[in-house]
Image (spheres, grey):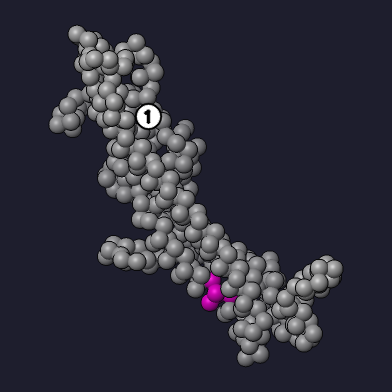
Amino acid sequence: MNLTDQQQDLLRLPELSERTNRIFSLRWSALLDEIGLTDEAIRHCTRASDLTRRIAVSKPPKIRGNIDDWLLSHSRAKHECGISQSATLAARRFDELATEYLILWSPGAGYDIFECQLQLIKERVLDEVASIWKISDATQRWYETVCAPSVRAAVSGKLEEFKGKARDSELVFLVRTKIDELSQPLDRAGLTEANLQDLPESVAAVEGGPPEGERGCPSSEGSTCTVQASTVAENVALPVQDQEKATSPTHSPTRFGQNIDRLRKECGWSFDQLADEMGCEKKLILGHVNKGRGAHPKTKKTYAQAFTRALERTVTVQELES
């Protein structure tokens, strides 16, 4: 994978705040208590009989008639050996860490970047789980020979799950970007899906060229529509070179747009910086803030996640909409 310098930086796990690291430290301690992997419990696991150990690491029998009995004894043996507890601990720890870093990752960076970060999370989790078994040489050997294979399998399964989530997020981001690109011709003409629906009599298909008093505008699909001159005067935006000079938006800002702008300023971000954090085009944000355009539920969630990261407090979609 050929990576830019910026992508190389993204391969390192983002630094978490001191408070977030403290939260994860407390959650780790709570997980150990909940699952019951105390020092005494670990020592007890290493005293399991050789028969119990062999059943715990055995493969399913080829004869289907014996499968139920094997499953029962296999499950009991895995618990007595500490395999089940260790695998559960690893999976839950990976889940909470990966969830946090998924929020910090931007779909615009590419899911390949997050896949590499997941590998770093995997290494951290495997080290953390192995560390609690380092009470003695005997407990450490027990973990490496009996528990570690199941722990690695559990973590690998969670890694694939989060890799799929990141891939889906990037796909949604790319589709939205494409939709925005296709909508730009209509936006330059001051036409949105809303006002096209409100003014059906203003838009007609061209047959042999536009009638007198009307002029054409390109649609998002490359065809041509016509808009009556009276409607053009009211609805067509300024030329591209004059758009930056416009002082009043086409539509009134909504509460959602006002909250986006307020939180953006609270973060100390420009619109470009917010777009980078969101992994989207600045034009999309300006549409929400200045033109009162609605946002997809997933876009609202992405806003909330970006502000939550920057402000180090929980910002909900409900807060954005209120």
Side (left or right) of 98 relative to 250: right
The outermost residue toward the left is 241
Side (left or right) of 5 relative to 55: left
Question: Which residues are drawn in magenta?
Answer: 125-129
Q: Residues within 10 Å of mark 1 (few under 14, many from 20)?
A: some
Residue at position x 39%, y 43% from top?
A: 175
| Magenta stretch secondary structure, dominant | helix
Placement of 234 over or under 79, stated as above or below: above
- Whether residue 297 is visible here, answered yes or no, is yes
- Whether residue 15 is visible here, answered yes or no, is no
Q: Quadrant of the N terminus?
A: bottom left
Residue 127, horizontal then vertical, whole percent: 53, 77
Residue at position x 40%, y 61% from top?
A: 112
Residue at position x 58%, y 73% from top?
A: 152
Q: Which residue is mark 1?
A: 293
Residue 28, horizontal then vertical, whole percent: 58, 68
Tally the numbered discs: 1
Residue in the foreground of this view, choosing between 181 and 307: 181
Placement of 130 over or under 201, stated as above or below: below
Helix, strand or loop under label 1:
loop
Residue at position x 45%, y 50% from top?
A: 169
Residue 298, horizontal then vertical, whole percent: 46, 41
Asked whether 189 falls inside the magenta stretch, the response is no
Placement of 65 over or under 198, stated as above or below: below
Residue 249, horizontal then vertical, whole percent: 27, 26
Residue in the foreground of this view, choosing between 56 and 314: 56
Asked whether 128 falls inside the magenta stretch, the response is yes
Q: Which amino acid lies under the numbered mark 1 shown in the image of this protein? A: Arg
